Image: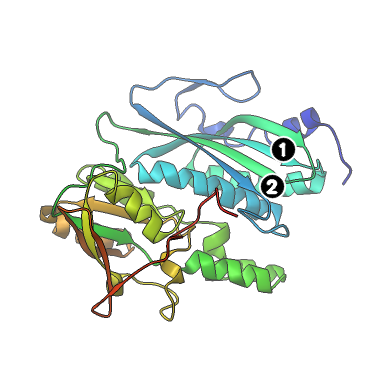
């Protein structure tokens, strides 16, 4: 397909994505104007993420999956707050190839239908370096949101799911250009991350802190413990992971599982929730009053290198 102008592409491929959800999300005005307008009586959460080619996704990743991965990664932040998705907007930088944009919009439609959220606007920029900037919003009931800094002394620490699937998926993408690999379980985890919305919405009633594993388990856990002025004992043997021969699954990001803390009296409720949603919620440690964080594997304490996870400021 030929390269065409911005306004034609927006009108043809983006304007009506998720428009059927506008009234359900209390929108007065959707995309197509200078700004969208909506009303809400609940607390609103907002987050924005940038995704760059060759940094956040491989250069040869199909555009449909660039879209699904970029938007779902952003909505994972909403999930970690215990919020329900409300809307999203996307600023896409690309070379205006119509085939690319058509496939990219198909990915946006998939996410819109999965989460029942409208695309309310964004921007389209012509450039050779592809990037995707995603803004997302969600809502919580008043005083019922989760944050990183609420962990307290002698609480249980939990982790959902399994670590290392996204890492394994990225490795498989880099090794194999065959389009059939995108059906693979590990690859799907990288291109179509699973959000833990059902879990986060339920634990928001009693969990004291929460974060999603986007920069690596160790790095993100410490983003809870340090602001909360808590230490911890973490039992790495209790964490399901793909590669038990190395420690990389503990430091690689993109799993988007949830780490959260809760009082021990809620343990039975958490296990019941795990059974109800069919997703493992693993008890992996306890918070401690001092600031020392101990990682224990095979009854030995493990020291992690200074680079414990993804850092956008490092090359």
Left/right placement of residue 65 relative to residue 239 reads right
Q: Farthest right residue?
A: 2
Task: Using the image as rendered, state which of residue 54 and residue 87 is in the foreground.
Answer: 54
Residue 13 shows which numbered tag?
A: 1
Viewer-proximal residue among 110 and 63: 63
How many neighbours does mark 1 have within 10 angstroms: few (below 14), some (14-19), or many (20 or more)?
some
Q: Position of residue 298 (x, y in %)?
A: 27, 80
Q: In the depicted view, which residue is nearer to us: 3 or 222?
A: 222
Element under disc 2: helix
Q: Position of residue 2 (x, y in %)?
A: 89, 43
Task: Please tell me whether residue 49 is drawn above or below residue 221 in the rendered image.
Answer: above
The residue lying at 40 percent from left, 79 percent from top is 244
Q: Residue at x 45, y 24 (%)?
A: 26
Residue found 42% across the figure and 65% down from its top: 305
Label 1 SS: helix
Would you name the residue on which mark 2 appears? 104
Q: Are marks 2 and 1 in contact (CB under 8 Å)?
A: yes
- How far apart are labels 2 and 1 at the CA level? 9 Å
Q: Earlier in the sequence, mark 2 or mark 1?
A: 1
Q: Position of residue 250 (x, y in %)?
A: 41, 66
Residue at the image position 29 percent from the left and 37 percent from the top:
145
Give the tally of numbered discs.
Answer: 2
Quadrant assignment, res 304: bottom left
Farthest residue, direction front: 306
126 shown above or below 241: above
Task: Give residue 130's position: percent from left, percent from top.
Answer: 72, 46
Within 10 Å of the Cα at label 2, are there few (<14), some (14-19), or many (20+) other Cα atoms?
many
Q: Which label lies toward us, 2 or 1?
A: 2
Answer whether residue 191 is visible to the viewer in this image.
yes
């Amino acid at each position: 397909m030929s390269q065409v102008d911005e306004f034609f592409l927006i009108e043809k491929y983006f304007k009506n994505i998720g428009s059927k959800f506008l009234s359900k999300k209390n929108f007065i005005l959707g995309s197509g104007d200078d700004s969208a307008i909506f009303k809400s009586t609940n607390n609103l959460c907002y987050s924005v993420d940038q995704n760059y080619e060759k940094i956040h996704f491989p250069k040869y990743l199909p555009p449909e999956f660039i879209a699904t991965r970029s938007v779902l990664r952003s909505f994972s932040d909403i999930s970690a707050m215990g919020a329900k998705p409300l809307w999203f907007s996307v600023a896409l930088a690309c070379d205006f190839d119509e085939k690319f944009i058509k496939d990219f919009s198909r990915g946006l439609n998939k996410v819109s239908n999965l989460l029942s959220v409208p695309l309310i606007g964004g921007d389209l920029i012509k450039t050779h370096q592809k990037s995707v900037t995603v803004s997302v919003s969600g809502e919580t009931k008043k005083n019922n949101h989760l944050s990183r800094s609420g962990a307290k002394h002698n609480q249980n620490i939990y982790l959902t799911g399994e670590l290392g699937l996204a890492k394994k998926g990225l490795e498989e993408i880099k090794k194999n250009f065959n389009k059939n690999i995108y059906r693979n379980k590990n690859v799907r985890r990288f291109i179509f991350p699973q959000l833990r919305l059902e879990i986060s919405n339920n634990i928001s009633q009693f969990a004291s802190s929460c974060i999603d594993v986007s920069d690596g388990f160790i790095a993100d856990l410490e983003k809870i413990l340090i602001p909360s002025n808590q230490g911890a004992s973490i039992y790495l043997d209790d964490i399901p992971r793909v590669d038990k021969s190395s420690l990389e699954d503990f430091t690689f990001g993109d799993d988007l599982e949830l780490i959260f803390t809760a009082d021990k009296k809620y343990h039975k409720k958490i296990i019941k929730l795990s059974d109800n949603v069919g997703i493992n919620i693993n008890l992996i440690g306890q918070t401690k009053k001092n600031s020392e964080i101990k990682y224990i594997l095979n009854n030995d304490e493990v020291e992690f290198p200074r680079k414990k996870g993804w850092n956008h400021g490092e090359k």
